């Protein structure tokens, strides 16, 4: 069984014109999986819909005043700008639902060995402030929740989004039962990168081969050293060569190999994986569907023995270099 977690609210957010956040990608990804791939017809794939977390549940992880200010729209304008979204009830509802979605993904992964959240990876949310499109740190929240489940004594967060997982690193710095592992571009947002338990910082323009070689080596060492009972995997696709906020030179096929490597390695070692799709930024939101859907393709290959034909398109455009964040 391969459970997917999704809610239509993920793409329901009014944003100013030309906002960088690819809000429609969640709906487009879901549509692609359910309509083009017809996954709902498969008996071995289930879609689960989360119910929003209660704001009070977040007050152990985040500062209660920060959560209350989010709820009441009393955050100072500078703090909202750092988050990067205008405040709205939709934004709040979407955040609480997505946070619940990552928690649900963890629970399903413990039951089935694998689960994929078609959202999640808000790793720039800190204890008392949000940043970089992240309000609530769903990864830290779900990892803490995992430790309350039977048989889970150690969790590893493997964060392969191109941006450093700074919020996760600081929130969980003193938590010996959660290992934070960030693989990221050394010269990219956020400027300040507090130590994760394991940081693999790679230079700008790292290519597919170098990326996979470096990551594979550290991945195997990290798993051997820490032997987690659960992996939370942020499969951000902003490592792609054409991503507008990333500076790596990794191909679409390279992202598939990365996803396959993580899932295959964890399955071999019988470690359940709760995966989230993470970042991926392009003005043409539809171009994000191929890279993001590969996570599901890799999971179908490994857990269901079903090989999905490659979606590798022909890219012709030059990579823009004006990205930030
Ligand atoms: Zn990112």
Image (cartoon, grey):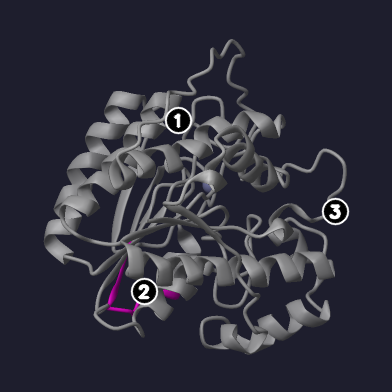
- In the visual, does 217 lie left or right of 289? left
**Image side of residue 221 versus residue 208, left or right:** left
The residues tagged by marks 2 and 3 sit, at their Cα atoms, a distance apart of 35 Å
Give me the C-alpha separation between circle 1 and circle 3: 30 Å
Residue 173 disc label: 2
Q: Nearer the viewer, residue 281 or 265?
A: 265
Q: Which residues are magenta?
A: 171-180
**In the depicted structure, whether residue 312 falls above or below residue 129:** above
Residue bearing the label numbered 1: 248
Residue 115 percent location from the top left of the image: 42, 58
Tell me the element at label 2. Answer: loop
Left or right for 76, reference 51: right
Task: Give the camera-side residue of 245 and 104.
Answer: 104
Say the numbered circle drawn on residue 14: 3
- From the image, state whether disc 2 or disc 3 is nearer to you: 3
Give the class, few, some or many, for how many residues have Cα within 10 Å of label 1's Cα (few <14, many ≥20). many
- 298 to 151, vertically: above or below: above
* Residue displayed at 66% across by 41% down: 31
Whichever of callouts 1 and 3 sits on the residue coming sooner in the sequence is: 3
Classified by dominant secondary structure, the portion drawn in magenta counts as loop
Q: Residue at x 35, y 31 (%)?
A: 307
* Residues tagged 1 and 3 counted as in contact (Cβ below 8 A): no
Q: Would you call the spot at circle 2 few (<14 residues within 10 Å), some (14-19), or many (20 or more)?
A: some
Residue 83 part of the magenta-drawn span: no
- In primary-sequence order, the first of circles 1 and 2 is 2
């Amino acid at each position: 069984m391969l459970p997917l977690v999704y809610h239509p609210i993920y793409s329901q957010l009014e944003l100013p014109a030309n906002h960088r956040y690819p809000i429609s990608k969640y709906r487009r990804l879901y549509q692609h999986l359910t309509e083009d791939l017809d996954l709902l017809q498969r008996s071995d794939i289930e879609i689960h819909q989360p119910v929003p977390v209660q704001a009070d549940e977040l007050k152990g992880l985040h500062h209660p005043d920060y959560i209350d200010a989010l709820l009441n729209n009393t955050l100072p304008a500078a703090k909202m700008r750092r988050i990067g979204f205008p405040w709205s009830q939709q934004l709040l509802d979407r955040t609480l639902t997505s946070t619940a979605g990552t928690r649900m993904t963890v629970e399903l992964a413990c039951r089935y060995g694998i689960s994929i959240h078609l959202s999640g990876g808000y790793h720039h949310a800190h204890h008392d402030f949000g940043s970089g499109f992240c309000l609530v740190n769903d990864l830290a929240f779900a990892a803490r929740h995992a430790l309350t489940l039977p048989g889970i004594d150690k969790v590893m967060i493997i964060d392969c989004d191109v941006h450093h997982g700074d919020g996760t690193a600081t929130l969980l710095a003193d938590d010996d039962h959660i290992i934070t592992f960030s693989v990221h571009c050394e010269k990219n947002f956020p400027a300040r990168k507090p130590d994760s338990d394991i940081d693999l910082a790679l230079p700008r323009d790292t290519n597919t081969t170098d990326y996979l070689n470096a990551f594979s080596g550290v991945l195997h060492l990290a798993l051997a050293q820490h032997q987690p009972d659960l992996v939370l995997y942020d499969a951000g696709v902003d490592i792609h060569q054409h991503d507008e906020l990333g500076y790596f030179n990794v191909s679409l096929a390279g992202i598939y190999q990365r996803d396959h490597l993580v899932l295959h390695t964890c399955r071999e070692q019988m470690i359940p994986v709760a995966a989230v799709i993470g970042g991926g930024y392009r003005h043409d939101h539809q171009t994000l569907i191929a890279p993001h859907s590969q996570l599901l393709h890799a999971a179908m290959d490994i857990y269901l023995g079903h090989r999905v034909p490659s979606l590798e398109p022909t890219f012709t455009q030059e990579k823009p270099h004006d990205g930030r964040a």
